[in-house]
Image (tube, rainbow, N blue to C red):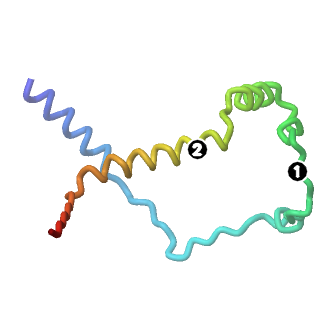
């Protein structure tokens, strides 16, 4: 049994040994020239159904499902603000209370 374990360990260690890949000091990546020739300006209008340009029915179904189940962004923002208010209210209980009373006769 010990011999079998030793063989397995030797194979595992031998599998890790080997030449390390050499990474050049200055690895530069240049984009293809066709990418630079195309216009990437923001003046191009984006349609409301831009995903239809791909012609993928699965993508269209996924986007339709996401839009149907998406909650309103304003409602989500209101929930975040409400949670922040409740957090501040709860953390205020950890602060010490200071009371002062005065009387004159």
Rendered-image quadrant of the C terminus: bottom left
Disc 1 is placed on an element classified as loop
Residue highlighted by disc 1: 46
Looking at the rendered image, the disc whose residue lies closer to the viewer, 1 or 2, is: 2
Looking at the picture, does residue 75 appear above or below residue 87? above
Looking at the picture, does residue 45 appear above or below residue 74? below
Q: Position of residue 90 (x, y in %)?
A: 32, 46
Rendered-image quadrant of the N terminus: top left
Q: Nearer the viewer, residue 29 or 53?
A: 53
Q: Nearer the viewer, residue 82 or 37?
A: 82
List the single residue furthest toward the front.
105
Residue 38, located in which quarter of the rendered image?
bottom right
Disc 2 is placed on an element classified as helix
Residue placed at 18% from the left, 67% from the top?
A: 102
Residue highlighted by disc 2: 78
* Callout count: 2
Q: Position of residue 7 (x, y in %)?
A: 18, 33
Q: Nearer the viewer, residue 75 or 53?
A: 75
Numbered circle sitting on residue 11: none
Judge from the rendering whether residue 6 lies leftward or rightward of residue 95; answer left or right. left
Judge from the rendering whether residue 57 lies leftward or rightward of residue 90; answer left or right. right
List the single residue furthest toward the bottom.
26
Residue placed at 87% from the left, 39% from the top?
A: 49
Query: Of label 1 and label 2, which has the lower sequence position?
Result: 1
Looking at the picture, does residue 16 appear above or below residue 39? above
Q: Position of residue 62 (x, y in %)?
A: 73, 28
Residue placed at 70% from the left, 30% from the top?
A: 66
Asked if marks 1 and 2 touch (Cβ < 8 Å), the reply is: no
* Gap in angstroms between the C-alphas marked 1 and 2: 29 Å
Residue placed at 23% from the left, 52% from the top?
A: 94
Judge from the rendering whether residue 32 lies leftward or rightward of residue 12; answer left or right. right
Q: Position of residue 97 (x, y in %)?
A: 21, 57
């Amino acid at each position: 049994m010990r011999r079998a374990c030793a063989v397995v360990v030797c194979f595992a260690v031998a599998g890790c040994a080997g030449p390390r890949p050499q990474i050049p000091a200055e690895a530069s990546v240049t984009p293809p020239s066709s990418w630079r020739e195309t216009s990437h300006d923001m003046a191009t209008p984006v349609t409301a159904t831009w995903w239809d340009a791909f012609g993928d029915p699965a993508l269209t179904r996924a986007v339709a499902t996401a839009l149907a189940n998406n909650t309103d962004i304003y409602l989500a923002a209101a929930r975040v603000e409400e949670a922040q208010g409740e957090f501040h209210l709860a953390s205020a209980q950890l602060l010490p209370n200071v009371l002062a009373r005065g009387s004159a006769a």
